[in-house]
Amino acid sequence: MTEQPIFTLVRPQMGENIGAAARAMLNFGLTRMRIVDPRDGWPNPRAVAMASGAATRVLDPAGIFPSLPEAVADCAVVFATTARGRELTKPVLTPERAMAEARALTAKGQRVAVLFGPERAGLENDDIARATALISIPVNPEFASLNLGQAVLLCAYEWGRQGSDQPAEAMPMAKTDWATRIEIDRLGDHWEERLDEAGFFFPDTKAEGMKMNLRNLWSRMPLTRADVQTLHGMLRQLLRRP
Amino acid sequence: MTEQPIFTLVRPQMGENIGAAARAMLNFGLTRMRIVDPRDGWPNPRAVAMASGAATRVLDPAGIFPSLPEAVADCAVVFATTARGRELTKPVLTPERAMAEARALTAKGQRVAVLFGPERAGLENDDIARATALISIPVNPEFASLNLGQAVLLCAYEWGRQGSDQPAEAMPMAKTDWATRIEIDRLGDHWEERLDEAGFFFPDTKAEGMKMNLRNLWSRMPLTRADVQTLHGMLRQLLRRP
């Protein structure tokens, strides 16, 4: 199993938010959660209900700890998520940078924790004092309203984004029966002939340029075999005299 | 003011989710929202209450449209967010890549829409038929549970993340004078009408499906304004009786 950072909820208040955090994590393949001193005790039925399918994968194996020092005792590196603008002398990383560090660290067998504070007030200075570095999500300074679940979601997304081996853009090539070049050529011929007969390439001095443009148009289009059949059929039907 | 993509909520159901989307957007500086046929009408007090400080910046100036074609009529490029795994022959982009394209396009004055479907079922095939490309958030295939607000949040985050440091690199899509959606719609209408008159959509039981396929074909093609003119002209010329 790939090593993962341990998302650690510090003194969470609402069970619903614990469940939402579990779901957000599992969307991006993260399953390691720890919970420090949950306000409403543990287990929490509201957390389980909200977690839905993530209950068994994330909540059931979650570690419950009475205090933050105990929760992170075995971790080599601790990131603490904070709202923007704390005056502290620790490195402040974006989620992007922090998750890159976390990937590098966990790949070397180092245990990494990412702390998320309570809903209302966030982490206290005493919690932050235990962190190696801070994570600050670069939000609009005039409007910052991320809640606990959203902060967890964005960090989990960054973890997943950086680990994803899929290309940034994927034409679903495997699923699609693309036309071959020769089929596109024949399509171009068919249209060119009929358009020529219809007097489309006019005046003669511009005909070559117009044909070239049309050729370019067909070859530039991502056409499937079915598209090519459709385009042949359209032309035939349009020219069928009633 | 920096040009921005227009986040377009298609037939949203709960006012709370519209408000949450507005908040998620404003966290990353996005203020341009359009709403298509909101289930509970407009204005919606629940949306305003949930939006909190984002109500005046995002909801008040939002455009309300009765249908999707009207909402995206002036847009050159339309991205549609979808769950994983649709069998379609359109490009599928990550949020990362899509927002990079959106930055490049908007920087050149092209109008870009990003569609988000209704809470329960997501976008319908008929909506997707109007999109240039799809956005798929690379979630855990065994556990995908993102809701509307979370999908909006992740796309907004990507927009903000990429704007925070790196300059928008000129991408190939941004260099060209692309046709707007209304131009593509009119092209589709023109061909559909003439093909209908020519008896192309036969038999009747298959007509709707054939029209949908053709709609998808046009919207999927990277058509420039010049291409659209050419395709109108071709059709007119073909039908001119000698």
Image (cartoon, coloured by chain):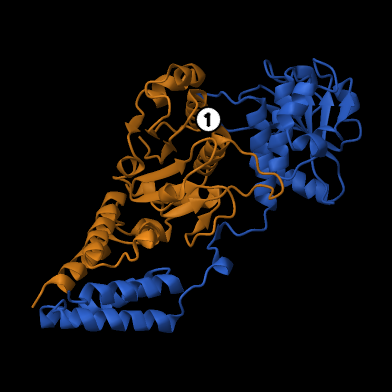
Chain colours: A blue, B orange
Q: Quadrant of the C terminus of chain A?
A: bottom left
Is the residue A216 above or below the residue B56 in the image? below
Q: What element does badge 1 sit on?
A: helix
**Front residue of A6 and B86:** B86
The three-letter amino acid code for the residue at tag 1 is Ala
Res. A152 image quadrant: top right
The chain that hosts pointer 1 is B
Q: Is residue A108 left or right of residue A54?
A: right
Is the residue B76 above or below the residue A130 in the image? below
Name the spot of residue B152 as percent of width and height, x first: 52, 36
**Front residue of A109 and A92:** A109
Q: Tell me, yes or no, if residue A93 can be seen here.
A: no
Residue at x-position 68% and y-position 36%? A24
Residue at x-position 79% and y-position 19%? A11
Name the spot of residue A235 as percent of width and height, x first: 27, 74
Res. A112 image quadrant: top right
Q: Tell me, yes or no, if residue A150 can be seen here.
A: yes
Is the residue A45 above or below the residue B109 in the image? above
What residue would you read off at disc 1? B24
Name the spot of residue A193 as percent of width and height, x first: 23, 84
Res. A8 image quadrant: top right
**Front residue of B168 and A200:** A200
Name the spot of residue A89 as percent of width and height, x first: 71, 27
Is the residue A124 above or below the residue A113 in the image? above
Q: Is residue B84 left or right of residue A22?
A: left
**Label 1 neighbourhood size at 10 Å, few (<14), some (14-19), many (20+)?**
many
